[in-house]
Amino acid sequence: MNAYALGAGLNPIFGGQKAPGETQAGLRHEPRPAIQAGRVQSVNLRYSLLVTARLRLFVIIGAFVLIAAIALMRIGYLGFVGAAPNQTSLADALLPPRGEITDRNGTALARTFPAYALWYNPKAMGDEGSPLVAPPAEVALRLKAIFPDLDVPRTMRILSSERGGYILRRVLPEDANRVFELGEVALEIPREYDRHYPQGSLGAHVLGFTLENDEGNLQGRFGMEEVLDEQLSDRELRGEPVALSIDLRVQGALEDELRKGMLATQAKGAAGIILDVDTGEVMAMASLPDFDPNLESAQHSPNIYNRVTNATYELGSTFKPLTVAAAIDHGIVRNLGKHWDATPVEMSGRLFRDNPSKGDTLNVAQALAYSSNTVTMRIGDELGEKRMREMMIDLGMKERPQIELQARGRTQWPEVRPNGTWSRLTTMTVSYGHGIAVTPLHLATSYAAMVNGGIWRPATLHKIEPGEAPRGRRVFKASTSSRMRQLMRMISIYGTGRSANAPGYRVGGKTGSAEKASRGGYAQTSLISSFAAAFPMERPRFVVVTVLDEPRGTAASSGQRTAAFTAAPIVGELVPRIGPMLGVRPDSTRDVDISDLRYLLEGQR
C-alpha cells in the first residue's frame, strides 16, 4: 500500500480526523442548515424560558417582601399611634365584650361566652298569618321534649303573641340542632354573648349579675359587676381579668358553715365576713339565703339583699370590748383587777340588770368573760358621752360602711339632743351594743382596728398587692390593742366564746345576743345572735364575724338561742377549715399569755 493510499481519507488540517461534511470516501458534502438552525432555536428557547421563570420568581418574591414590609410598617404605626376610632382590630374581634372577674388566686368567678338563644319571630314569614306550621300548644310541647325545664304556659303565651320574644337564653348547640329539626322557621337561634358564673351561687352577693341594656350590651346591675362595669366593658382593659380580694376556697367554707348553722338553729337568715386585719381585704363575704346569678330571675330574687353590708342590727355585747378598749385608752380603766359595781342600774325609770347575775362586784376581766351589762354601762358612763361618741365616729360607725358595693346600709345613729350630743342613758346603752344599729361589716372593721395595733382601715373587695395597703387612721393605742388581744383570748377560753375555741388556732372573740328592735320597743322572742372573733390572737391576721337572724332553740343548740350556742360554734367549725387556706396552721405550742387574767377571773386582785 502506498503512501497515498495510507493517507486516503485523512485531512491533514484536522490531524487525520474527518473534516466537517466529509465522508469516508473522501468526498466533501455541504452541512444541512435546517438541522443546525433547529438546534440553535431550541437552545435559545430554553434560555428564554429560564430567564422568564427567573423573572417571575423575582417578581413574586418582591411582591411578598413588599407586602410584608407594608404589614410591618402598619403594625408599627398602630403600635405607636393606635387604630382608628371606628376600626375594629383583630384582638378586639376576638375578645368577649365583657372582661373576666377572678378571685385573688386567678380562679374564674364571672366569664362571657358565645352562646345561643331560642327566639320566636312572628314576622319570619312576613305579615301573612302565623309563621308556625303546628299550633302553639303543640310546638310548646315539642320544645318541652327538648328542654325538660321549659315553662310550657309561658312558652305558649310567647308563641301566641304578635311581638315574639326570648323563649330561652342559654341553648346548647346540640339542642339548637334539635330545634332546627322541628322545621319551624319562626323559631330562631340567634348567637349572642352570655355572662356565666362558673361557681353558681357562691359569692353571689359579691359578684352581682348583668342585664342587657337597650343597645343589647351586658351591663352590671348589682355587686362588683356594677362597680366594675366601665372597666369590664372597656375595649382596652377587658382583656385583663380583674382580681377580687375574695379567696374562693375560703368563700366556700364560710357559706357552708354558715348554712349549717342557719339550718341547725332554724334561723331566718345569716351573714358572715372574713377580713384581713392589716389590709382591709375581704377574704370572704356571705349572706344567706342567697341566689344564683346565672338565672334570669336573679334580679327579682328577694335574696339579693346583702345582710353583711346593707342590713343593720343592734349587735349587743360584741360592743363591750370596744367600750373597754376606749376606757383603757383614756385611763378610765387602769387596773383590770379593780372591782366595779355590778348591781342593777336604774336610769330614767328603767332597770337594767345582768342575766344571770354573777355578784355585786366584778372586775373588768370578769365583766367581759361573763358579759356583764351593768359593769359595761358604768364604764361607759365614766368614759363619757363625748369620748364614747368620738370613738364610734372614728370607727366609721356613723356613716355607711366603706366598701365598693352600692348596697350599703345607713347606720341607725342614736337620737341626739339639739346640740348634737347623746343623753347619759344613750351613752350607757350604746356601751353594750343597744340603741345603735350597724352592719356586720362595721363590726368587722372595728374589731380589726382593735386587734391589729389600733389602726382602722376601710374594707375592700379589690386584691391589694403587698406593700400597698392604705395607711388608715389610729383609733386605739398599740398598748391598748395588745391588752385587748389578751382579753379576747381569755373570753374564748373561759367566757361565753368557749365554743369558738378551735384547738391550735388561738381564737379570741366576743358573743352578742340582742333582742330585735320593733315598734315601741324590742321583740323578746326575736334575737340577733352574733360572734366577732380574730385569730391567731398572739398576732391576729383575720377577723371573722358571724350573725344569725332569729335563731331558735333547737336540739343542735341545746335549746338555747343566744350567741354562745348559735353563732360562736360556727366560728369554731370554720376556723380549722380556713386556717390552712390562709396560711395559718394549728400550733398547740403557742398562745397568748393570759396568766394574770386567769387570776383575775378567780377573784384575785
Image: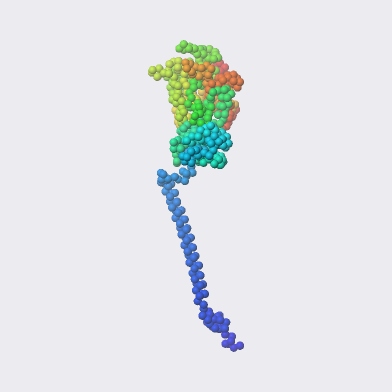
- Residue closest to the far left: 419
> Is residue 116 or residue 408 the one in the foreground?
116
The answer to whether any part of residue 582 appears in the image is no
Q: Quadrant of the C terminus?
A: top right
> Is residue 378 or residue 58 the one in the foreground?
58
Q: Position of residue 143 (x, y in %)?
A: 55, 37
- Residue closest to the far bottom: 2
> Is residue 370 or residue 593 the one in the foreground?
370
Residue displayed at 50% across by 67% down: 46
Residue displayed at 57% across by 21% down: 565
Q: Position of residue 35 (x, y in %)?
A: 52, 74
Residue displayed at 46% across by 30% down: 405
The answer to whether any part of residue 268 appears in the image is yes
Colour mode of the rendering: rainbow
Residue displayed at 50% across by 38% down: 130
Q: Position of residue 322 (x, y in %)?
A: 49, 22
Q: Position of residue 263 (x, y in %)?
A: 57, 24
How many labels sit on residues? 0
The answer to whether residue 314 is above or below residue 35 is: above
Q: Quadrant of the N terminus?
A: bottom right
